[in-house]
C-alpha cells in the first residue's frame, strides 16, 4: 500500500443502515497481499436496479453480463472481487462469470439475472473463480447492515483510501437515505484499476425512473472527472433501491416529489467522484474547472475535459506555475465555438485575460499564491452562449510516472 | 539548453542548394539567451506555395495572416522568429504581423500577400516586433543558398537538436531536389513550442497540385505523430516550389510523372516528423504503432493515435514493461470497430493475444528484451477490415514532467 493521498478526506464518513441491504466481505485469495478481496451485497426482494457501464469496446466479461442482467430491472445480489478484472479473458472469462452468478443465485435463492458482478484488477489474467465460489456461501451467512466501510475497502486496488458518502433526503415528506461507495485511482489505473461505484437507497422508485436518475447524476459526477484520460474496460456504476422506505412509489421522472432525491443523488455521486480524483495516481492538487458561456452544456463539458486532460495544463499545475497560455491552447484545441476576444480565464478568482490578450491589470503574484494551495480553481468563459459545466481533475506529477512506469519493478 | 535527446540522429544531414532559395539568420534580441531567433528565406520570383495550419480555434496571429496570404498561391519570402509565438496577443498581435509583412515586402520588392510569417515561443506576451523590423534589412543583404543548418537551428525553442532532411527524385526524368527543416519537441511544447515545418523544392508544379501533395504528405507524417496530445496554436507546414528545375509543369495531381515526387515528399516529411518525435520532451524511447485490419484508414489512424496518446501505454513503455493489457484498454477506448476475439497485438514482432485472451504460447521474456531497446514496435490487428495506418510517438517519462512542471523554477 502506498502512502495515503495528501488530498484524502480526514476520515471515512458515517454510513447508516439502509433497510434491505446487508453486506459481507472476505479474503478469498485472489489478492496476492492477503487483502480482503471479495464483497457480497444482499438486496431485499423487490429491489430495483439501475446501471451505467463503460463504453469501452473491449468491455470485460462482468460488464457484458451486467448489461444483460439489467434488462430484468431487479437485483438480489452484487458480487465484487478486486485483484483481477476478468477483462480480455475470452471464453473462460465468460464461464467464470456464469459460475459466480449460478452459485450466488443458488445460495440467495433468486433468479440468475438478479445477480450483478464486478471485477477489478489485472487485465488479461484468468480469474481464479473457484476461490470466489468457495467463499460465497460463507459470506452469505455473515452479512451485516453495518459493513459499509469494509465494503469500500474491499473493492480497492491502487486506491490509497476507501471512498464512501451518505445523504438523507425526502420524497413526498418521507425520509429516504442514500449510501454510496466507490473505488478508482485513475479513470483506469495501471494494470490494476477501474472506476466502480455502488449507490443504495431505501427509496421506492420505479426502475425506469431510477435509470434516468442515475444517468443524469453520472453525467454530472463520474462522467465529469478525469485523472489521465484513459477509459477502463470495467467501469460500472449501479444504483439499487430497496423500496423499504414508506414513500409513495414514484413512477414518473418529472414527478416534483422526486426533485430533492435527484438533487441528493447528484450531491452524493459528485462527492464520490471527487474522492476518486482526490485519490488520482500521484495527485498533489485537486483541480476544479468551471466553463461558462459555451454554445451548449455538451460543448462546455468538452472544453472542460480537454483542459482537464491536457498534460501541459496538468504539469504546469503540478509545478505551481500559473501558465494560463496552456489553458488558451486547450480551449483552442477543444474545437468548440469560442470567441477569442471575449475569452475570460480566471485562476483563483483572478481575471487573467481581456480583449484577446493578457489583462493589463493582471498581477501574477496573487495567482501564484493560489497555485501553492491544494485546491486549484479555474474558470473559463468562452463568450459564446449560455452552456456551462464543471469538471474535476488532479495534477500530473512524478508520482503518476512512478506508479505507472515502475509498476512491475 | 537541455541535454541532447538520446534518440537524436547522429548528425544533421547534408542539405544541398536549391535553385531559387536563399536564407539568412540572426539574433534580433527576442530570445533572452542571445540565441539566433530570426530567419528570412527569400524565394525566387514565380515560386508557388502550399500550406497546412493548426486547426486550433485559438490560432495565433501569424496563422490568420498565412491563411489569407495563401490565397495568392505565390510566395517571395518567409520570416520566422523563435522566442515568442505572437499567440493570444489580440489586436496588437495582428498589428505586429502587418508591420513585419510590410517591411519584408518593401525590402524584397514584392506584394504583401507573398510574404509568409511564423512565430514560435511564449504564448500571450506581446511580440517585440520592432526588433524584427530593424534586423530584416540586414538579413536581406546576407542571404545564402547554404544556410540550411543555421535556419533549422534558428527556429528551435525547446528542441535539443536541429531537424533537417533532403531527398532527390525526378519528374518526367528531370532531377528535382527537396529540402526540409522542422522544429518541435511536443505537439505543443511548454509555453515555448509549436510544430513548424518548411519544405523547399525546385520542382515546377502548379499550386493546386502542390497543395494536394502537401495535404496528402502531412496526413502521413506530421499528422501521424504525437508527443503529448496537445495541439499548438501555431502549427504550420509550408511547401515552396521555385520551379527552377527543368521539368515540364505538372498541372494534374493524377499525372503519373508526379508519382516519384509524391513518394519522395512523403518520405522526407515522415523523416522530419520522426525527428520531432525523437526530440519529444523527455523522450527515451521512439515508438512505432502500426494498426491493420481496421474498418477504414481513418479508423486505423484513430486507434493508433489513441494508443499513442494513452498515458498508461506511454508510462509502461518508459518503465520497459510489456504491459499489453493497456494496449487492449486503448483499443477499447478508441471507439472504432474491433473484434475482441480476432484482436492480435504484437510487440517487437511477438504475438501476445489470441482468441480474445492471452496467447498460450506467449513468452514475456522475449518481449521484455525488446522493451529495453530504444525503438519499440507495436503492431495491432483489430480483425475487422483492411484499413491500416502507422503512427509514431515517444514514451512519457519523468523528463516530461520535469520540463513542463519545473519550467519556470
Image (tube, coloured by chain):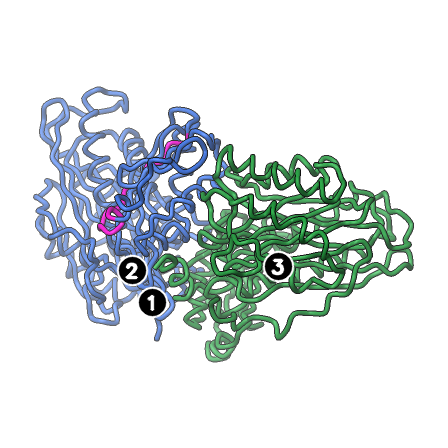
Chain colours: A green, B blue
Percent across and percent down for residue A389 are 63, 56
Between A92 and A177, the one lying in front of the other is A92
State the image quarter where residue B97 is shown: bottom left
Relative to residue B168, is residue B402 depicted above or below?
below
Q: Which residue is tagged 1?
A: B402
Dot 3: chain letter:
A
Q: How busy is the neighbourhood of tag 3: few (under 14 within 10 Å), some, or many (20 plus)?
A: many
**Between disc 2 and disc 1, whose residue precedes?**
2
Looking at the image, residue A329 sits to the left or right of residue A144; the answer is left
Percent across and percent down for residue A145 are 76, 60
Q: Which residue is tagged 3?
A: A273
- Specify the segment rendered in magenta: B369-382
Dot 2: chain letter:
B
Quadrant of the drawing holding the C terminus of chain B = bottom left
Cα separation between marks 3 and 2:
32 Å
| Foreground label between 1 and 3 | 3
Identify the residue at horizontal 38%, vertical 24% (top origin): B386
Amino acid at each position: 500500500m502506498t502512502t495515503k493521498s495528501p488530498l484524502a478526506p480526514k476520515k471515512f464518513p458515517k454510513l447508516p443502515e439502509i433497510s434491505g441491504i446487508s453486506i459481507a466481505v472476505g479474503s478469498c485469495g485472489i489478492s496476492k497481499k492477503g487483502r480482503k478481496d471479495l464483497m457480497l451485497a444482499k438486496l431485499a426482494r423487490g429491489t430495483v436496479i439501475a446501471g451505467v457501464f463503460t463504453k469501452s469496446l473491449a468491455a470485460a466479461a462482468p460488464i457484458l453480463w451486467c448489461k444483460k442482467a439489467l434488462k430484468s430491472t431487479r437485483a438480489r445480489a452484487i458480487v465484487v472481487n478486486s485483484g483481477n478484472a476478468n477483462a480480455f479473458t475470452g471464453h473462460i472469462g465468460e464461464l467464470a462469470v456464469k459460475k459466480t452468478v449460478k452459485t450466488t443465485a443458488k445460495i440467495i435463492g433468486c433468479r440468475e439475472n438478479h445477480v450483478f458482478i464486478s471485477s477489478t484488477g489485472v487485465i488479461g489474467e484468468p480469474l481464479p473463480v473457484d476461490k470466489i465460489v468457495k467463499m460465497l456461501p460463507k459470506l452469505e451467512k455473515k452479512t451485516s447492515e453495518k459493513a459499509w466501510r469494509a465494503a469500500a475497502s474491499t473493492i480497492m486496488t491502487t486506491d490509497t483510501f476507501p471512498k464512501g458518502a451518505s445523504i438523507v433526503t425526502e420524497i413526498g415528506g418521507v425520509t429516504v437515505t442514500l449510501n454510496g461507495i466507490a473505488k478508482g485511482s485513475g479513470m483506469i489505473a495501471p494494470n490494476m484499476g477501474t472506476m466502480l461505484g455502488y449507490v443504495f437507497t431505501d427509496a421506492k422508485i420505479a426502475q425506469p425512473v431510477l435509470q434516468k436518475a442515475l444517468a443524469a447524476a453520472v453525467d454530472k459526477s463520474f462522467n465529469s472527472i478525469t485523472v489521465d484520460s484513459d477509459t477502463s474496460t470495467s467501469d460500472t456504476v449501479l444504483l439499487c433501491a430497496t423500496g423499504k422506505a414508506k414513500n409513495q412509489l414514484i413512477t414518473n421522472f418529472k414527478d416534483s416529489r422526486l426533485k430533492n432525491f435527484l438533487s441528493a443523488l447528484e450531491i452524493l455521486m459528485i462527492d464520490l467522484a471527487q474522492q476518486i480524483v482526490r485519490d488520482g495516481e500521484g495527485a498533489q492538487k485537486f483541480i476544479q474547472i468551471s466553463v461558462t458561456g459555451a454554445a451548449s452544456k455538451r460543448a462546455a463539458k468538452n472544453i472542460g475535459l480537454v483542459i482537464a486532460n491536457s498534460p501541459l495544463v496538468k504539469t504546469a499545475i503540478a509545478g505551481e506555475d500559473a501558465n494560463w497560455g496552456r489553458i488558451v491552447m486547450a480551449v483552442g484545441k477543444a474545437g468548440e465555438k469560442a470567441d477569442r476576444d471575449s475569452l475570460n480565464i480566471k485562476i483563483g478568482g483572478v481575471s487573467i485575460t481581456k480583449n484577446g490578450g493578457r489583462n493589463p491589470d493582471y498581477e501574477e503574484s496573487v495567482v501564484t499564491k493560489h497555485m501553492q494551495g491544494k485546491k486549484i480553481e479555474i474558470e473559463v468563459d468562452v463568450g459564446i452562449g449560455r452552456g456551462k459545466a464543471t469538471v474535476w481533475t488532479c495534477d500530473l506529477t512524478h508520482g503518476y510516472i512512478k506508479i505507472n512506469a515502475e509498476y512491475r519493478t
